[in-house]
Amino acid sequence: MTTPSRLVVSAPSSGHGKTAIAVGLLAACAARGVPAAGFKVGPDHTDAAYLGLAAGRPGRNLDPRLVGAQRIAPLFAHGATGAQLSVIEGAMGLFDSLTGQPEIDGTAAVAAALRAPVLLVVDVAAMGHSLAALVHGFRMFDEMVHLGGVVLNRVASPRHEEMLRTALDDIGMPVLGALRRGDLPAVLPARAHGPVPVAHRTVEAVRAVRRLGEAVAGALDLDRIMALADTAPALAGSPWSPTDALAEATGEPPLPPGNRPVIALAGGPGAPYTYVETAELLTAAGADVVVLDPLRDEALPPGTRALMIGAGLPEGYAEELSANHRLSAAVARLAHEGGPIVAEGIGLPWLTRDFDGRPMCGVLDASATTGAQTVAGYREATAPATSPLAPAGARVTGYKQHRAIVTPRAGQVPAWTWSGGNPEGFIWRQVHASQLGLHWAGAPDIARRLVAATALPGEAPQIPVKAGVAPPTEDPGEATLSLTAVTPPNP
């Protein structure tokens, strides 16, 4: 049983300033010397990265759809270890959901699962006494959610603020901060850059976080907010552990220390392009995880046996990927030599011949172009064939968000199939490439499979993979490996 101090920062809807407030709150705590941890509800890599930058430790995602509702509290407790305050930034509005099922994966559901008080950020620029009705409705809508205070954003004047405070005082709702119009600077790098500025620890990203921290420290009552977070009761159960998760999923011990393969994980010194638990699971499974910056590094880390490219890298960096000719050649060499590669998001177009006419790695016999619309949403996917990622028939839940259109959509052996849609992605030798992003905490034995697939000929049998596209010049052969099927997260 653990009792981490925690609160959820949410809003009536998107656009009220909750991301800036959450980031600023963490930065203000860090400036005070208060150890803090940041979390993001849902699959958003970008917000999680900035929350992590502000807190000075990796930002994490809490997504019931991707990992199963039963894992939310243990994953939170794991990520909050050592923190004096944990800030969980919601997604969309407090009672909204990307899937239309807020009782399962909305911010309110996560707040209830964590028994965390909610700090509601409201853009009051065009509001008067009706604010009290809005806040009262949010407070009463779900008895499992405790609305503990409000932050007023974009207040017009001292008189406006006094009116709003009086209205909320009438319903007994504390106001824990107020910001005038312009007090909360729009300084975070454009979302089109994704987590890249954090991964590269750019001056722009660091300065933006600092300025938000200064704005929040000057306008919010940090002592009262921390006192609100301290009211969160103890959480039952034990924190999530990558070692325990692997043992439960596979029933096998990790590889001996002397046999640890090097697995390159796409990212930067400030953040990976996947969920933090991916590296933790790979390490627990017996790998030495080394960060690879696909935009700057011209070679794979020495001794690399496998590569994992997460879905956090935005498609807007296709030109930089194309320009890194040496790394593209190294990735192609790894694939042709039978090294396992797991590619998500833009990782799939990067492995094709070209993307918008720019040359890519050329591993897969396909091309990619940028489409007019963004495809986004969760998918319940099934593996049609065995690969380093999953055995045939395994079911997983993933999230995709992309504009790139890959032609053909799938290889001779697709990466995934799902109900109501055409097969997608490619399995070729030990390459598994798809635009679907997974949270490995929902299927931890993926890490064990990828580590096992790195075994060199003569060390251990390889996972059999059917050829799907242009064959390489050498063929190391195929063998069999029996592993446990991926456990699907609860819907």
Image: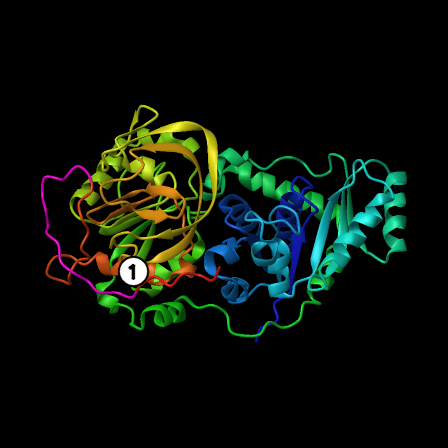
Q: In the image shown, does 191 or 441 lie closer to the viewer?
A: 441
Residue at 69% across, 66% down? 230
Is residue 84 at least partly visible in the picture? no
Q: Is residue 327 left or right of residue 114?
A: left
**Magenta stretch bounds:** 469-484
Residue at 67% across, 67% down? 232
Query: Residue tagged by mark 1?
Result: 287
Horizontal and vertical percent position of residue 224? 76, 59
Horizontal and vertical percent position of residue 313? 42, 40
Question: Is residue 356 inside the magenta stretch?
Answer: no
Q: Is residue 69 left or right of residue 22?
A: left
Residue 345 image-quadrant placement? top left
- The amino acid at mark 1 is Ala
Is residue 64 at least partly visible in the picture? yes
Question: Is 373 placed above or below 399 here?
Answer: above
Horizontal and vertical percent position of residue 163? 90, 44
Residue at 45% across, 43% down? 199
- Helix, strand or loop at disc 1? loop
